[in-house]
Structures are given as C-alpha cells and as structure tokens.
Image: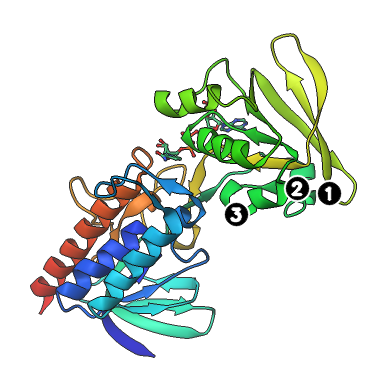
Amino acid sequence: MEKIECLIIGSGPAGYTAAIYAARANLNPVIIQGIQPGGQLTTTNDVENFPGYPDGITGPIMMEDLKKQAERFGTKVINGIVTNVLFSDLKGGYHKVIIDNKNEIQSKTVIISTGASAKYLGLESEKKFMGSGVSACAVCDGFFFRNQDVVVVGGGDSAAEEATYLGKLCKKVYLLVRKNKMRASKIMQKRVLETDNIDVLYNHETMEIMGDQTVHSIKVLDTINNSEKIIKATGFFLAIGHTPNTSIFKNQLDMDEVGYLVTKPDSSLTNKPGVFASGDAQDSIYRQAVTAAGSGCMAALDAERYLSEIV
Ligand code: NDP
C-alpha cells in the first residue's frame, strides 16, 4: 500500500492539467488513467477551439502531449481503474482509493477528473447490436462503415461533428434530430447543412435498430405525421450527450440529481476535506476541453493550498 500527497483520478484535460500543476508544485502526483486513457478527447478528430493551435490538433495527439507534459515534471501515470474509494472526514486524513479491486493507494488529497460517458437511447436493439453496427464514437468506428449508409442521432455539437466526420467516409449520412431544430452551434450546423451527403431529418425518433448478425436498417418515426419508415443503413451512431462518471462517489460526495459533483462556489472543493472535483464530472454547463483544463488547474492549486494548511 502506497501513501502519497496527491492522487488524480481520470486522465482527460482536467486530470492532466491538475497533474502538471501538482507536479510542478512538488506534490509528486499519481494519476490513474481510468477506462478511457486520455478521456473523451481521444475520440474527437479535430480540436479547433483549444487556444494555441491555430491549425487545430487531433484529440489523441493533444492528450498524448498533455501526458508527456505531466510526466516531464514527475507525474506517475498508472494504467488502471478505480474500483472503490473511502474518503476521510478528517482534515489531514488519508483517503483510501482501490485500483483494479486489489491495489490500495492512500492519499492526503484526491482530485477527481473522471469526466463523462456517452448516453444511449435505451433500446433493446441498441444493446443487441453494440459493436456490430451501433457505436457512440464515429472517430473510433467510422472507418468500418466506409462507402456505406449510416444514421447519426442527436442535434448538438457532438451529433454535428460526428455527422460531418462520417460524411467524409460514408456514402450517405442520415442525421435524426428529435426536434424541429438542432441545438448545435451555428458554425457546426452550417457544416452539416453544406455537406451534400448528409440528410437532416428533423422531428424524427428512432424506434428500432434492425439486422441479423449486423445492422441493416433503422425503423424511425416521423413525429409530425406519426408515420414510420425504414432507413437502410449499416451503422447507427449515438451523439445524444453524456452522463458524468461519478457513481463510485455516491453516498460520499454531494452531487446533483444527474450525478454531477457539487463544488463550493469559485473553487473545486467538495464536501470532503482534501477531495477536489474538476472537469466534466462537475461541469454540466460548459463541458469544454479548455474549461476542463482550467478547472483541473484550480483543483491542483486548491490541493496545494490544502496541503500547506495541514502540515
Ligand atoms: P448536448 O447535450 O449539447 O446535445 C444532445 C443532443 O442530443 C440534443 O440535440 C438532444 O436533443 C439530443 N438528444 C438527447 N436525448 C435524446 C434522445 N433520447 N433521442 C434523440 N435525441 C436526443 O450534447 P453534445 O454531446 O452534443 O455536446 C455536449 C457539450 O460538448 C456541448 O457544450 C457542446 O458544445 C460541446 N461539444 C463541442 C464540440 C466542439 O466544439 N468541437 C464537439 C462536441 C461537443 P434536444 O436538443 O431535443 O434536447
């Protein structure tokens, strides 16, 4: 069992930024990468809105760079999943964190940056074809659907981005939007609407994903005239938002009804002393790489301040 000063859970922009700051403050941080090393950005193709990259950068390269930057200052990166936590109520007490059901680390401070995960519609057929036609990541799986017809569900920036990405690979992309408008930013909507092989179907909902071994068509409902139709498509991509990855902290940390961790105003402080929250796990509003990075920085500064108060 290892005893340390600063443990970071999650390796997205929030986690790695926290690690860079904590390492440079000599806290010798350890970061547990989690289920998706590098976080959600590793499933994003072009990041065009992170300051400092005038030509954009791919998500995986950006995350690799952040990891290198954190390691350069001495961060220890562990490939594992946190399976249990026991947070201390005492100021200065050690928090216990179990990794992969077997290894225990005790840390005086814990920075949570576990991010969020893609949402699914909850259809039986969606589960059945998971990995054989159903995906929540166009960048990961789009390649398998080259020159084929696919469906994307959602009306936000993720859906617009996924549809545009798939438009470059696939023969035809049907974008199912449940309302009569998209909520994606104007620039992303414009890209979708200007792509010839993307067909936006407003007021459409998914009823069933159909196929044998793999998907061959999607049954949809036109909610304006209440009529069903079948779209022939071999891929079904979900882009309907995310849920915070915080279930492991339930009953220990304060969270809202959706599961976003609650932090004290203008800080990363949770209800437990020495436990700090950053990134999408606590942000239901902005959810951007740059805001996650900013909150990771805040968490590391808060952890440093906390440690200097307890010695
Ligand atoms: P959002 O929550 O913004 O959008 C989710 C979309 O999915 C909405 O259009 C919603 O419809 C739709 N939806 C939700 N549930 C269902 C359902 N059961 N059936 C059909 N449609 C459904 O999530 P995003 O992931 O798109 O974006 C999250 C955040 O990340 C945003 O702040 C976004 O700006 C940002 N982002 C930025 C990117 C970039 O700048 N490159 C790329 C991707 C995301 P409705 O509108 O009807 O509620």
Three-letter code for the amino acid on which mark 3 is drawn: Cys
Write down the residue under mark 2: 133
Q: Kindly state the secondary structure of the residue where label 2 is placed.
A: loop
Residue 291, position as x, y percentages in the image: 28, 47
Question: In the rendered structure, are the residues bearing label 2 and label 1 in contact, judged by CB atoms less than 8 Å apart?
Answer: yes
Of the residues shown, which amino acid type is indicated by label 2?
Gly
Q: In which quarter of the image is residue 270?
A: bottom left
Q: Mark 1 points at which residue?
A: 214
Tag 2 near tag 3, CB within 8 Å = no
Determine crowd level at label 1: few under 14, some 14-19, many 20+ residues with C-alpha closer than 10 A.
Answer: some
Q: Quadrant of the N terminus?
A: bottom left
Kindly identify the residue that appears in the image at 35 percent across and 37 percent down.
Answer: 285
Question: From the image, which quarter does the C terminus lie in?
Answer: bottom left
Q: Earlier in the sequence, mark 2 or mark 3?
A: 2
- The residue at 49%/27% (across/down) is 191
Comparing 268 with 129, the one in front is: 129
Q: Can residue 262 be seen in this view?
A: no
Q: Distance between the residues labelled 2 and 1?
A: 6 Å
Which label is found at residue 140?
Answer: 3
- Which three-letter amino acid code belongs to the residue tagged 1? Thr
